[in-house]
Image (cartoon, helix red, strand yellow):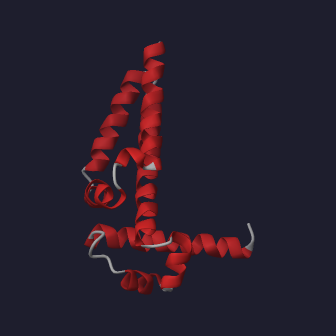
Amino acid sequence: MSVREQKMAETRKKLIEVARRAFAEYGYADTSMDKLTAEAGLTRGALYHHFGDKRGLFAAVVDQIDSQMAEYAQQHREQPDDLWEGLLLEGQTYIQNALNPEFQRIVLRDGPAVLGDPAHWPSQNRCLQSTRECVEQLLAA
């Protein structure tokens, strides 16, 4: 990775990190892009370059949260030798994560209002695909 690419990745990561905290605390509507970029020590131009707009940044935050949750749930599913037990653990993990206030505000409340139907979110499709594969394995057994 070139120095330029590394710097771009760091900028993107910093914006998502600061935005995630802001969206969790204030919600989408009350999160100011000026305050967010100031806290990140970056310009609005950097935000627009990487994400297009506030909605694009929000989508990146939702994707990060969903991806982390899917990875965590899959790790729990793979722990037991029994597929049924794994599927139950995966479901419990999803429920535990859904009880997290950050997850509730960003993904469950603001997500559908800002991004539309969760069934069309790429990260949601990854979560569903993982569960679908487990169920298919159970049916084939």
Residue 126 seen in the figure: yes
On the image, the x and y values in percent for residue 38 come to 43, 87
Looking at the image, the residue that sits furthest to the top is 141
On the image, the x and y values in percent for residue 78 come to 47, 32
Q: Is residue 110 toward the left or the right of residue 140 in the image?
A: left
Residue 42 seen in the figure: no
- Compared with residue 87, is residue 38 higher up or lower down, i.e. above or below? below
Count of numbered badges drawn on the protein: 0
Q: Name the one closer to the observer, 1 or 57.
A: 57
- Compared with residue 125, is residue 60 higher up or lower down, i.e. above or below? below
On the image, the x and y values in percent for residue 122 come to 47, 48
**Residue shown at 51% from the left, 77% from the top:** 48
**Residue shown at 43% from the left, 18% from the top:** 138
Q: Name the one closer to the observer, 53 or 22.
A: 53
Q: Is residue 101 toward the left or the right of residue 87 in the image?
A: left
Q: Quadrant of the N terminus?
A: bottom right
**Residue shown at 28% from the left, 59% from the top:** 113
**Residue shown at 61% from the left, 69% from the top:** 9
On the image, the x and y values in percent for residue 85 come to 37, 25
Quadrant hosting residue 107: bottom left
Quadrant hosting residue 124: top left
